[in-house]
Image (cartoon, rainbow, N blue to C red):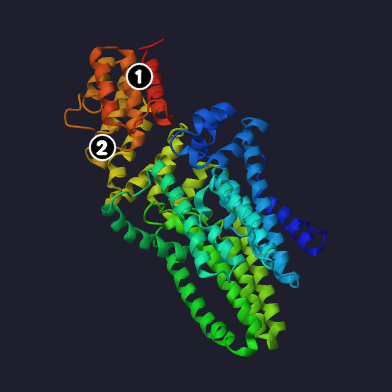
Amino acid sequence: MKLHLNRNSFCFLILTAILGYLHFKNGVDRHLIDYDDLDVVRPLFKLNFESYLLDWLPERRHYAFPIRDLTLLIDYWLGGDNSSLFWVGNFFYFIISALFFALSLQLLMPESPLLYAVLLSVFMLHPFQTEVIEWITCRKYLAGGVPIALGTYLTVMWRESGLSPKKTTALIGLWLLSLLSYPTAVFWIFWAIYYLNRRLAFKTYVRLYLGLAVVSFLYLWLIGRNTSEINSSLANIIPAFGKSFHYAYNALGRGFFNLMIPFWTFPYYKEDHEFTFVGLILLFITGLALFKYVYLKVKKPKNRLASACVKECIIWFCGGLIFFIPTVNTILGFFDFMLADRHFFFSIPFFIIALGYLLQALHEIFSPYSKYVKMGLLALVACWLMASGISIFSKAPLWHDDFLLMKDCALNEKSPRCYSQTIRRRFFKGDCNGLKDIILKAAELYKDRPPYSFEYKSEVPFFHASCIALNLNISKEKKVEFIENLQEFYGPSPEIIFGLVLSSLERGQLDQAFNQANQYYLSDLTNGPIFVTRTLQSIYLGQIAALCSLKPSPICKDRFERFQTMHGDAELNNHAGSWGKEATLIMAKRGALIP
């Protein structure tokens, strides 16, 4: 495998430099954004290789991504708690995948340097790549993408000679290596084998594919079972098909729109957005035009070359589609590929190669007008790449700050999920001053949307009351009044009790704090568990632990244990639980209840 220093390799190096600048322009101080990065990456900092194997991998959810976690550990061992190195690692794995894609293009289109440059530019500078490069947790896509990119290059290199036992073993090895980082490519091996042996006997296909299918579905089942995302009963599967259809048409519209138009849309794309339906309309128009002006023409004998290009186009397009199968299936419940750019990472190279074959077919069909077609294509690509660069330039900075990231989504897309994330993440960083307007806007949005009434009645009043209690610029006496007045705005909500307890502790009134907590989460829970989010459950558990340390008693110990039993998702030592305990002790210290 050699990358000769020719026009193609020079183009690759130039595009790499441009891509690096667009993503690296804000400086080398990259931050772990509090948007899964802290949950996934930071816990790795306390591991060595032995604890990684013995403690980390056997835990729930972890053994699905051992290669991803190992690459993150290597970054940590090399540079310590230096988040810029994690980003450099992301960029490195992306460039390796891009290199194999560039080599594949060189083999597939050796006589078309202009087309090579166009397709490679679209791949390198597509705004879809921003999320994968910038978000450290997306390492699972990048680390899993490298063996698939290499395997795809090998299938292209071996396309004339076909498969052999050694080649099959090599491809299966790369396939398994990718699955150890992320299972998105679980069906890639089926495409690779078909691509190399399109004339195999039907029985051979059946035997080979059945064996691979068993391995693939067992692996998906194992991952789904381990991450508790499997719909184990028929009662769950039937409604899941309706959910699949809903996500499928959103994904199709959103994906087609963003693949063709380098337009800034937030990673968590709003369901049933206008652009979704624009994308579906574009897809229908494109399909109709291709049928009329390509399919019907290539059926004529004089267009055999165009016909061959169209067949290759279809094969590569189907290769891109197979990566969506594990993400929108109804059994495992991975219903999120509609929501984010990162899920298209594996598919983009296949779609771009399909586009290359389609353009070659169009060139053959409209050969009398090839000069004008080429000029028009270059003008269109130039405008697209310029818009794409601008989109990346404005998009990348958001991935440096979780608050900006979520605030942009909350205010521009009016997404309830983004409001919740914005408030929650910033709250735990102690920035209540910056949350006032966001809280009020979220409350207004939730109030009129019944599906989010749970958030409206629980988390929003909780954070609002807690911010008032923690505010040093409000007098101790006024805090209680302000917190109690929230009930006029939100309606009766027991979640404000947490803020009232904090205020009582600040005033040195320990007995009153116990009495207030006893009205809700410190009660004997004879009526059953309290229904709030897992975050609030952990916070309440943390406060109960702190209160019991301030005034130890058998009753308090018993109620702490009962709360843990009834709320199995509550964790004392996670981020929320630790915060609940520390906030309670800080307020007790302000009230001179502890030294």
Amino acid type, label 1:
Ala
Counting every numbered tag in the picture gives 2
x 64%, y 36%: residue: 75
Q: Quadrant of residue 87?
A: top right
Q: Compare residues 593 and 42 and report the one nearer the observer.
A: 42
Q: Nearer the viewer, mark 1 or mark 2?
A: 2
x 57%, y 45%: residue: 139
Amino acid type, label 2:
Phe
Of pointers 1 and 2, the one earlier in the residue sequence: 2
In the rendering, which numbered label is found on residue 295?
A: none
Tell whether 278 sits left or right of 553. right
Label 2 packing within 10 angstroms: few (<14), some (14-19), many (20+): few
Helix, strand or loop for disc 2: loop
In the rendering, which numbered label is found on residue 531?
A: 2
x 54%, y 80%: residue: 290
In the rendering, which numbered label is found on residue 546?
A: 1
Q: Compare residues 542 and 56 and report the one nearer the observer.
A: 56
Q: Quadrant of residue 537?
A: top left
Q: Quadrant of residue 352?
A: bottom right
Label 1 packing within 10 angstroms: few (<14), some (14-19), many (20+): many
